[in-house]
Every structure is written in structure tokens, then in C-alpha cells.
Image (tube, rainbow, N blue to C red):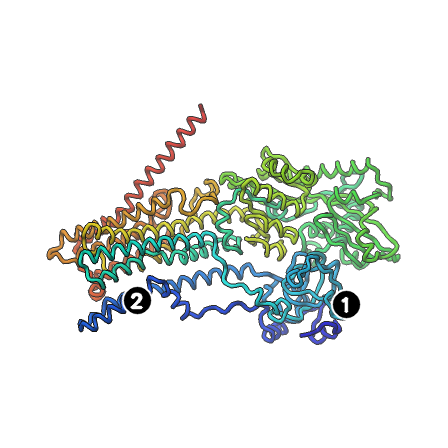
């Protein structure tokens, strides 16, 4: 609705909005029904029917359908009425398409579920209480609570604002944030818009438009995103698949020509050749990889790491440096006040001086306290929550203090100033400015200090304060300084930015945030995995150093402060960056320089962040990790991964699982391609040796159907190798087919193809009447069952017996089911008639079983020699190093 220029109060009454109470649950439900979900329209999804026919649109599949159709027509003209073979071929093609459709839907649903997990959240007041809800559930009339780092969930009228500003570049193209205020008339200055970020300050606003009715909704056609782009790996696989497809078509063309030269009927040869092409071309490979990827992402989400961008999974395995924030990530984010001191030294927290200090820090504070005594609960930023709780324990009634000294204005904390100030009305009409922040920043704004009375602050007292600060920081305490001053009247908007000057220093407060119990183990795990852990913090260098020592991050490295970093040029920083593993007193802007410096040294960098100012560093890093609990929506939007528990160990677990997902994708690719090559070799080898085709068209298609789906997907669920974090990071320059994978795929494919030919030759030798049914049946079974056996070789570089033959239950069940299907078309007479198979005797089944087990035996021997070879190389290298 067009509300510009109308009265704010009039619109609020029209919406029945109650700022202090918010909507009731009943009103929320009614408004959601009336106005719909707070979402932009997405591109219309293709119907199931269209998606099904898209599965049949592959060029070779179309040729196969055409060939089957020609076969039916010729049979009809000849009066043979032999329609069974082409109908069965078409049936298998349709079944393949259905399986492909199911796989595609499964991957879509998995990715949609992950997308929902990382959806933006919004803070609202409903029925007098504050809730965090998905942005899609916001409705007209809701009261939004906004602060720096939030995305605005919907177009809203501002009803209160403290230094509030919004980045509206997405709508207007203006790069400078727009300051927001309250107003009696609705104008741009007192309206915030959906999808825009709050850059500073805080405020409250009432929602007036949602979804497609918002300003951003009006240009939704420009913003609606289509399908998620493929990852670099998927793109490489598509290219590789095309190349292999062309190769398969050429080989099938050669096979067709060889068949004609051996006087095989043209139509029969066409069916065999095209069926082989359909079976050999890895058209389902990208879909299988997507499903394996989706399953891995769901597993990561269960471990508190939500991947927002698919390429991050590939990059995780390559990470060589993890730059982590200290507070809440390496530590518990459970701040507790443990000490206080004034100019004359340490004081008891129960003393009158400490109470004065704590009361000031509780007033200059945005945390909320509910209850009292032992039942007191506090919500808010951890540092402020700790200060409020300490004041409560000291017997200070913060509610009374707030009533006696009502807040009239605020200058929010800023990562550059590292200060926060609030202005309070005193009983005598004057205004008190309270400021808290980093001691080395706040002391520069002080001209006096309080010690029973106000005294001038000289350089001697400043040194004394900084010595006390360092002594507290050396004990791993986070230190905050508190100061104040009284002025005659409230400052104007212009004067407000100059108010943090000539302050009176009161004292220092020390807090402890203990390291997470699991962090030290995670750091050690990174070290063994060839990953450097870097701690970045806004805390004092000594505090950072103490925590880093405890966690094993510091080692023999140095600590670099933000001031020292500022004195280094980019070139100097690039050269010196590897000397440091701890950066203290840094700003978000410094984080960007640190990331660039590591990247200049060819490192793959993961970076954590939570604030709106961390977004550039998160985007710049190869892997941006945002905090799910304490992180702002802007940080989450810029990140590749969201850590729902804000825990450093979760980043390390994400790297471990990222490597595991990459391994599983390689396993699926390795299995599928070696199996496909085996199918080609079995047919090509027979014609090169002047033999008849060892399999007919429907048998080839059946093998492809049985072996290419369930086992490959089950390999995607393989547990991450125990030694995966003892390997070096994956080299991003190496492709998925590096380290000899192509050689193994080809040789194993030849082995499978030759085993099928061997079975075919044995069958011809023992066939009592020289017919082809028995040898083809043996080749058919060996080609299929040997591939199922070979899937177990893919599970690990180690012996399958050392990791447990039955430890991957999904693979065992998949192979048993597929083996049952394969045996059924031989043993079950009606199916045997369709697939032209002969009944096998016990001895013939034993031959099939023996040949099918050969891939397992060969690969076990190869793995044993490989392990032995690695040990010999290791011993030789050890001997050289000792000499």
C-alpha cells in the first residue's frame, strides 16, 4: 500500500499494532493467512512429468528407443510378432528414468532441507516476549527488534531508534548507509526495507509489508534465483562425462562395424551397440555425486555445521589455515567477573568502590536481567551479561538504578573505537556520560581519574593503569575499563560524536572466559592434519597469548598486535605472515589483510566471524564460517558455513567431514567408471577376438540398472577414514582423477571386462550343444556380480577386512539386494525367458562365484603391496634424515 507522507500513528492504528506488546498468536496466525508467507516468489518448478521426460532426453537413450521401435515395426512386417525383446528394452529404459527421477528428487529435497536450516532469522516481540523466528514467518503488524548486523525481514515503520543506520545499496545503489529516525509522517528516514542490513545502532519497527509487497518484492524478477549453480567438481565431472561419452560412442561404433563384418544382423547389432553406449556413458554420474554431496551435507548439519554454498565442501578438504576468533569459538563464551582494580590496585568485588564500578558498567549495558538472587537469569552479549550478573551478585538493584538514572541516549560499541557510551539523566537535571571499553582505547579519552575524589590524570597514572591492565591480561583475563563525566545538558546530535572526551577514569574489571575443553584437542588434530590454527581477537595481546599457550596455538610463534600490523605494508605482511599464529587488538578490517596475506602465500584460508564488519573477511576467505548463536544475519549471509554451536571444534569436524565427503565422491566415481569400462571391454574384446557378443541388449541394460545405482549411493555413506586427519590437505591444483586414479579405473575396468569374457569362454567350452545361452548367462552374471564385489574395494585404501567387511551396512544391503535381482533373472523361469538366460548347475554357479570374487582378491594383494611399499619408502626417508 502507498503510505508515504501519511501519519505514522494512523498507520499503526490501522494495523492494530501494539509496540510494547506485539501481536498475539491469534493475530499472527490471522495475518499470515491474510498476507501469506514473507517470501519472494521462486521460479516455478518443473512438473514430475516434464522431469521424467527430461530423463529420457539423452541422445543415446533416444536412439535406443528408436531402435526398439524399429525392431517392433520390422517384427510386425515380417509377421514374427517377436515384440518381447524391444518391449523389455523399453521397460528397462523407463525403469532407469524413474530411478533417475527419484535420485534427482532426493538430492533436491536434501538440499532444500539444508537451505531451510540456514534461512535468515528475525527477532520479534509477540505477546510481550522476544522471540527469534524464521524471517518467512514474519507478518504484517509484527514488532521487529533491530540491531547492527541484522537483515531487515520486511518493510517496516521505525518506532524507536538509537543511532540506527541501514545499508540500502541493494535498493537505491547508494553506498553510504542511511541514518534512520522516528517521525510523525512516514518517509524514507523512518522506514526500513526488507533485505537491507542494519549497519549500526539499534531500534524497533512495525512491519507494514511482507513478501512480494515489499520494495524488494517489486523488483523480485531481478532477484529471484534459479537453480543452485554446480560446484567446480560437478562442472569437471560434466566435462569428463562428455569426453567419456564421446569415447563410448566411438567404441560402440567400432563394435557395430565389427559385428556387421561378422555377419551379425544389423538391427541386433544396433540394439547391442546402443545398449552398450547407454550402459557405458556415465550420464548418471553428476546425479549420484549430487546425492552423495547432499547426504554428506546433512551429516555435517547434524554435527552443527550448515553448509550454505556447495563449493565450500570441496574447499574444506583443501584448508591449510583456520583463522579463528577467540571469544566463544576457542573459549566457552561464559564470561565471569573475577577481579576489579582502581588506581591504587586490586579491590574486593564486595567493596564500596567495586560496587560503584559495577553499577556504572550495569547502566552502560544492553543485557537484560530477569529474576533476582540465585534465580536471576541474564540474556545478552556475554561480556555485558557477565557485568550485569556481577552487579546483581554485589546486591545492586539494576532496575532501581535504571529508574534513578534513566537512559536518554547511547553511542553503540564500535569495533574501531572499541568503546560504548550511554547518557543518563541525573536527579539534579544534569546528564552523566558512562563509557566502558578496551583500557588502552578508553584511557586515551580520559583527562581525570577518581580515587575518593576527581584528580588530574598524568602520564605516571596512565602507566600505572596500563601495568595493572597487563597484569590482569597476563592471567588470561579480559579487561574492561570504566569511565564517566557529568555535563550540564544533553548534547545535540552533532555534539554526541564528540562526547567521549575528557572522561574520568574509575577502574578496571577483569573477566575470565575459560577455553573450551575440546578446543586443545581440536588444535592438535589440525596440527597433525597439516592445518595451521591462527587465533584472531580484539583482546589484549597478553590475554590472547595466555589463552593461545593453553590451547597449544602459540608454539614458538609471535603475537602481532593491531597497532603493529598497521605499521606493516601489505608486502611486508605477506613476507612475515607465517611468523605469527596469534593476532591481538585487531579490527575487522585487519582480518581482511590477514586473510589476503595468507592467500598470497598460497594458503587455503578458513575464517570465522560474527559481526556485520566481519562480512568482508568472510567473503574474502576461501571458507567463511559464521557463528550461528552469536553471529549476525549479515555475517551468516556472507559466510559459506554457519556453525550452530559457535565452536572451534565444529570447524575442525567440518574439515574432517569435508575430506570424508570428497573421499566418498571419489569412491563413487571410481566405482562407476571402472564398472562402465568393464562393460565396454567385455563386448569390444569379444568382437576383437572374433567371438559373438557375450551379452544381448537387455542384459547390458540390466547390468547397468543393477550396478550403477544403489551400490554407488551406498559408497557415499562410507564412514570417514580414521586416519583422514593425519593426511595433508588436498591440493586444490590436483583434479579428482589425480594420484593415479585414471590408471586404477582403466586397469580395474579391464579386469572386470576380461573376467566376463573368461566366463563367456568357459561357458562356450562346457556348453553341451554349442548354444550361446549358457555362456552368455555366465558372462552376464560375472559382469554384474564382479562389479558388486568390486564396490567393497572402493571403501578404503586399506584392506576391507581391516575396516570390517560388514561395517558399511547400507553397502552390504545394497549389494545383497542387487545380487538377489541378478540371480532372480537366472533362477526364476519367467524372468529367465525374458532375459534369455540358461539355468546354471551348482558347478557353473561356483565358477561364476569364483570369477566374481577375483576383483576382491586382486585389490587386496595390491593394497598389501602398496602399504608395504609406503613403509619401505618411509624407512628409507627416516634413514636418510638420521644420516
Residue 626 image point, x, y percent: 59, 52
Residue found farthest to the top: 883
Q: Earlier in the sequence, mark 2 or mark 1?
A: 2
Residue 245 image point, x, y percent: 35, 55
**Counting other residues with Cα less than 10 Å from the Cα at mark 2, is it few (<14), some (14-19), or many (20 or more)?**
many
Image quarter where the N terminus lies is bottom right
**Nearer-the-camera pick, 507 or 504:** 504
Image quarter where the C terminus lies is top left
- The residue sitting at 21% across, 61% down in the picture is 827
Is 601 placed above or below 157 here?
Answer: above
Please state if 337 lies on the left or on the right of 312 as rendered: right
**Nearer-the-camera pick, 20 or 579:** 579
The total of numbered circles placed on residues is 2
Residue found farthest to the left: 769
Please state if 799 lies on the left or on the right of 255 as rendered: right
Is 13 placed above or below 557 here?
Answer: below
Residue 433 image point, x, y percent: 81, 52
The residue that label 1 is drawn on is 183
Residue 456 image point, x, y percent: 86, 41
The residue that label 2 is drawn on is 65
Please state if 532 lies on the left or on the right of 18 as rendered: left
Label 2 vs label 1, nearer the camera: 2
- Indicate the secondary structure of the residue bearing disc 1: loop
- The residue sitting at 62% across, 57% down in the picture is 633
- Indicate the secondary structure of the residue bearing disc 2: helix
- The residue sitting at 41% across, 50% down in the picture is 664
Can residue 426 be seen here?
yes
Q: Mark 2 and mark 1: span between their CA atoms?
A: 70 Å
Amino acid at each position: 500500500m502507498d503510505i508515504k507522507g501519511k501519519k505514522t500513528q494512523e498507520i499503526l492504528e490501522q494495523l492494530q499494532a501494539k509496540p510494547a506488546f506485539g501481536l498475539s498468536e491469534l493475530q499472527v496466525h490471522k495475518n499470515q493467512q491474510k498476507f501469506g508467507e514473507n517470501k519472494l516468489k521462486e521460479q516455478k518448478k518443473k512438473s514430475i512429468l516434464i522431469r521424467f521426460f527430461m530423463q529420457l532426453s539423452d541422445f543415446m537413450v533416444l536412439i535406443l528407443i528408436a531402435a526398439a521401435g524399429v525392431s517392433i515395426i520390422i517384427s510386425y512386417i515380417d509377421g514374427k510378432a517377436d515384440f518381447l525383446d524391444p518391449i523389455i528394452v523399453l521397460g528397462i529404459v523407463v525403469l532407469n528414468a524413474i530411478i533417475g527421477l527419484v535420485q534427482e528428487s532426493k538430492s533436491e529435497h536434501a538440499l532444500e532441507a539444508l537451505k531451510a536450516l540456514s534461512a535468515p532469522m528475525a527477532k520479534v516481540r509477540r505477546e510481550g516476549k522476544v522471540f527469534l523466528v524464521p524471517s518467512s514467518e514474519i507478518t504484517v503488524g509484527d514488532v521487529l527488534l533491530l540491531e547492527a548486523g541484522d537483515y531487515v525481514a520486511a518493510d517496516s515503520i521505525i518506532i524507536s531508534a538509537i543511532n540506527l543506520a541501514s545499508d540500502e545499496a541493494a535498493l537505491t545503489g547508494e553506498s553510504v548507509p542511511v541514518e534512520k529516525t522516528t517521525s510523525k509522517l512516514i518517509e524514507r528516514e523512518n522506514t526500513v526495507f526488507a533485505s537491507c542490513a542494519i549497519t549500526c545502532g539499534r531500534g524497533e519497527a512495525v512491519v507494514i509489508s511482507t513478501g512480494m509487497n515489499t520494495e524488494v518484492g517489486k523488483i523480485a524478477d531481478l532477484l529471484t534465483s534459479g537453480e543452485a549453480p554446480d560446484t567446480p567438481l560437478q562442472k569437471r565431472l560434466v566435462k569428463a562425462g562428455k569426453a567419456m561419452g564421446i569415447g563410448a560412442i566411438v567404441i560402440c561404433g567400432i563394435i557395430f562395424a565389427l559385428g556387421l563384418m561378422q555377419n551379425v544382423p544389423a538391427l541386433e547389432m544396433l540394439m547391442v551397440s546402443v545398449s552398450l553406449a547407454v550402459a557405458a556413458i556415465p550420464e548418471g554420474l553428476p546425479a549420484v555425486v549430487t546425492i552423495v554431496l547432499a547426504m554428506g551435507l546433512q551429516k555435517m548439519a547434524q554435527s552443527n555445521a550448515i553448509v550454505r554454498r556447495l563449493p565450500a565442501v570441496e574447499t574444506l578438504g583443501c584448508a591449510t589455515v583456520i583463522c579463528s576468533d577467540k571469544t566463544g569459538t576457542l573459549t566457552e563464551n561464559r564470561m565471569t567477573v573475577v577481579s576489579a582494580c582502581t588506581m591504587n590496585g586490586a579491590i574486593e568485588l564486595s567493596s564500596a568502590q567495586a560496587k560503584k564500578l559495577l553499577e556504572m558498567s550495569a547502566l552502560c549495558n544492553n543485557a537484560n536481567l530477569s529474576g533476582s538472587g540465585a534465580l536471576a537469569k541474564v540474556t545478552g552479549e556475554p561480556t555485558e551479561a557477565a557485568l550485569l550478573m556481577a552487579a546483581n551478585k554485589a546486591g545492586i538493584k539494576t532496575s532501581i538504578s535504571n529508574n534513578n538514572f534513566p537512559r536518554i541516549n547511547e553511542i553503540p560499541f564500535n569495533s574501531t573505537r572499541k568503546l560504548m557510551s550511554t547518557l543518563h539523566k541525573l536527579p539534579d537535571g544534569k546528564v552523566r556520560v558512562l563509557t566502558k571499553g578496551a583500557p588502552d582505547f578508553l584511557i586515551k579519552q580520559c583527562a581525570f581519574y577518581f580515587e575518593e575524589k576527581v584528580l588530574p590524570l598524568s602520564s605516571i597514572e596512565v602507566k600505572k593503569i596500563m601495568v595493572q591492565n597487563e597484569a590482569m591480561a597476563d592471567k588470561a583475563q579480559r579487561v574492561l575499563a570504566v569511565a564517566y563525566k557529568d555535563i550540564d545538558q544533553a548534547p545535540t546530535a552533532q555534539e554526541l560524536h564528540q562526547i567521549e572526551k575528557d572522561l574520568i577514569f574509575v577502574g578496571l574489571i577483569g573477566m575470565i572466559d575459560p577455553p573450551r575443553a575440546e578446543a586443545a584437542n581440536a588444535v592438535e588434530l589440525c596440527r597433525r592434519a597439516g592445518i595451521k590454527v591462527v587465533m584472531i581477537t580484539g583482546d589484549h595481546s597478553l590475554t590472547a597469548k595466555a589463552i593461545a599457550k593453553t590451547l597449544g596455538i602459540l608454539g614458538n610463534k609471535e603475537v602481532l598486535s593491531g597497532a603493529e600490523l598497521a605499521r606493516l605494508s601489505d608486502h611486508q605482511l605477506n613476507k612475515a605472515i607465517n611468523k605469527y599464529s596469534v593476532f591481538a587488538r585487531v579490527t575487522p578490517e585487519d582480518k581482511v589483510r590477514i586473510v589476503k596475506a595468507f592467500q598470497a602465500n598460497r594458503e587455503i584460508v578458513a575464517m570465522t566471524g560474527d559481526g556485520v564488519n566481519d562480512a568482508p573477511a568472510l567473503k574474502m576467505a576461501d571458507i567463511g564460517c559464521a557463528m550461528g548463536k552469536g553471529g549476525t544475519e549479515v555475517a551468516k549471509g556472507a559466510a559459506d558455513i554457519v556453525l550452530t554451536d559457535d565452536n572451534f571444534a565444529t570447524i575442525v569436524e567440518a574439515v574432517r567431514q569435508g575430506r570424508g565427503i570428497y573421499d566418498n565422491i571419489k569412491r563413487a566415481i571410481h566405482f562407476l567408471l571402472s564398472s562402465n569400462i568393464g562393460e565396454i571391454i567385455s563386448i569390444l574384446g569379444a568382437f576383437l577376438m572374433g567371438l559373438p557378443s557375450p551379452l544381448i541388449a537387455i542384459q547390458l541394460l540390466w547390468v547397468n540398472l543393477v550396478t550403477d545405482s544403489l551400490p554407488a549411493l551406498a559408497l557415499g555413506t562410507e564412514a570417514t577414514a580414521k586416519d583422514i586427519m593425519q593426511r595433508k590437505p588436498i591440493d586444490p591444483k590436483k583434479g579428482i582423477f589425480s594420484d593415479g586414479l585414471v590408471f586404477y579405473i582403466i586397469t580395474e575396468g579391464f579386469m572386470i571386462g576380461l573376467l566376463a569374457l573368461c566366463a563367456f569362454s568357459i561357458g562356450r567350452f562346457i556348453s553341451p550343444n554349442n548354444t550361446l545361452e549358457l555362456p552368455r548367462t555366465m558372462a552376464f552374471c560375472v559382469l554384474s556380480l564382479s562389479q558388486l564385489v568390486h564396490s567393497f574395494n572402493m571403501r578404503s585404501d586399506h584392506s576391507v577386512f581391516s575396516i570390517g567387511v560388514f561395517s558399511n551396512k547400507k553397502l552390504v544391503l545394497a549389494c545383497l539386494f542387487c545380487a538377489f535381482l541378478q540371480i532372480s533373472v537366472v533362477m526364476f523361469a519367467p524372468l529367465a525367458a525374458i532375459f534369455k538366460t540358461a539355468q546354471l548347475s551348482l558347478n557353473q554357479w561356483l565358477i561364476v562365484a569364483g570369477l566374481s570374487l577375483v576383483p576382491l582378491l586382486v585389490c587386496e594383494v595390491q593394497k598389501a603391496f602398496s602399504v608395504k611399499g609406503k613403509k619401505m619408502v618411509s624407512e628409507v626417508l627416516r634413514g636418510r634424515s638420521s644420516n
